[in-house]
Image (tube, grey):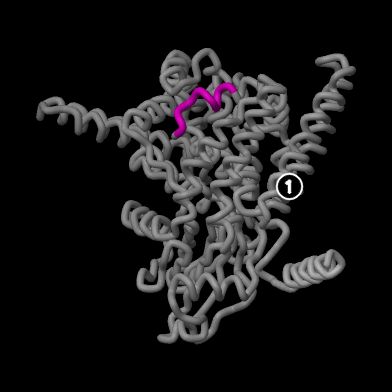
Amino acid sequence: MARRALKLASLTAATSGIYLYGNKFLDPNDFGIVRVGRAVATTAVIAYDYLTSLRSVPYGSEEYEFVKSQVHLRSAERLRKLCCANRGTFIKVGQHLGALDYLLPEEYTRTLKVLHSQAPQSTRQEIEQVIREDLGKEIKELFMSFEDTPLGAASLAQVHKAVLQDGRTVAVKIQHPKVQAQSSKDILLMEVLLLVVKQIFPDFEFMWLVEEAKKNLPLELDFLNEGRNAEKVAHMLKNFDFLKVPRIYWELSTRRVLLMEFMEGGQVNDKAYMEKNGINVNEISRNLGKLYSEMIFVNGFVHCDPHPGNVLVKKCPASGKAHIILLDHGLYQVLSDSFRMDYCRLWQALIKADMKRVQKYSRRLGAGDLYPLFACMLTARSWESVNRGIDRSPVSAREDVEIRSNAAAYLPQITQLLNNVPRQMLLLLKTNDLLRGIESALHTRASASSFLNMSRCCIRAVSTYQRSKSHSLYRRAQISLAEALSLWQINLYELFLWLKGSQLGNWVIALLSRMHHSTY
């Protein structure tokens, strides 16, 4: 009897094993114990490496810096492998960390950046399953053609090109089927692990990352919310004729499936593509700055994931104008009026190198005594450049290296600061870093025109807010007059800069110089 029971158990186990192996919908990575075990083991190894490798090395010495860099590199690689193995939420958080160029050690950001190109792909069967469950039809019933190979795969979803039965070419964004169920558990796991790490390393302050994931992931997993964001930003920025946002086809969209107008182009950081297609790199950089200044300072509704795969450029054959195509509208930050006004006034102070107001508004935004570090984080400039005026000179290679090395040296202070500032600031810092990465790739960083556009938006935003709070017609007229005067001054200064850099300007300056010398 026992022998028969043993044979039956063996047969059941073997059959189950064959079923699990042969069933493409089941993956060892989907089992909680595997995901938890892998995350716990990786965290333990990273913590042990830091504890033991740096213990016997004199703090502050050259050897200490070298060993610390090696530990950063090993730990970042372990973290990358964990994200790739656990996928979904882990890749999303890893991508977020990889975007924080001027906030985290370079070893981490350089290693984790590759996660944008290493996101998992769902199989054809999984795609069919999601479409069948959400739209109630098979792919062949909905589409005349449907490309199996995705145009792009991200941490939460992938996009396929397809043609509807009526002939319209569309982009179909489909959520990975297991992400929804795993996300809340993954975030809880990260929270527990970060709390444990903080007990070992008291200076480790990354709970803000978990808090942001808790708040933002449910929104990013709701594709109907993404569609509404796309329509809102398209309407909000309709005055920018260079901006294109794909139209949403609501009749075939759900929380896990989003159908959009198909748009294509080169990635915004692809300088070679722009030069090949006759697109002005400086114009693209300037227009991107205009878009984000308008979103941040004027509207307080900010697209917070401008990595190159989500921002495309294309030259319109008919008009010859270069268009910016903004994709992936799942993650937006809504700024409160009080935050937006403080942020506007801080940037005005930074551009004018008004250190008293820099200190005042940095403190109001939660920076406290770390306001110099905060100013450097916002501008990605050294404290010396901030004091001199960030529009006075471009970023030098030496300054860029200094900023990156300071990110490692001041990591405890940076994490403390990130815990203290308003939650709205966190996504703005990430957005700033992504935009700087694009500017760096295009070699257009810190141009005077970008600061002038920011100044215009700050003036308009503050004036609009002040008018809305004033009940006096005379006071509103004063505000409007001051606004017009300030904008006129900026236009005059921009004209001066243009003349200074143009051939006509050089000719005028040479003529005036000759006239000056001839009078003596």
Determine the residue positioned at 75% across, 46% down.
38
Tell which residue pokes out farthest to the front in this image. Answer: 1
- Frontmost residue, 479 versus 145: 145
In this rendering, position of residue 222 left or right of residue 38: left
**Residue 238 image-quadrant placement:** bottom left
Up/down of 418 relative to 500, above or below: above
Up/down of 448 relative to 23, above or below: above
Q: Residues within 10 Å of mark 1 (few under 14, many from 20)?
A: many
Asked if the stretch drawn in magenta spans residue 420, the answer is: yes
- Frontmost residue, 291 versus 369: 369
Type of amino acid under label 1:
Leu
What residue sits right under mark 1 in the picture? Answer: 82
In x, y percent, where is residue 42?
Answer: 77, 40
SS at badge 1: helix
Asked if the stretch drawn in magenta spans residue 224, the answer is: no
- Frontmost residue, 341 versus 117: 117
Determine the residue positioned at 53% across, 56% down.
180
- Frontmost residue, 36 versus 401: 36
Up/down of 293 relative to 120, above or below: above
In this rendering, position of residue 360 left or right of residue 473: right
In x, y percent, where is residue 72?
Answer: 78, 33
Up/down of 500 relative to 138, above or below: above
In x, y percent, where is residue 265?
Answer: 55, 66
Tell which residue pokes out farthest to the left in this image. Answer: 473
Name the chief secondary structure element in magenta.
helix
Residue 16 in view (yes/no): yes
Determine the residue positioned at 38% across, 44% down.
301
How many marks the image carries: the answer is 1
For the magenta stretch, what is the residue range?
Answer: 416-423
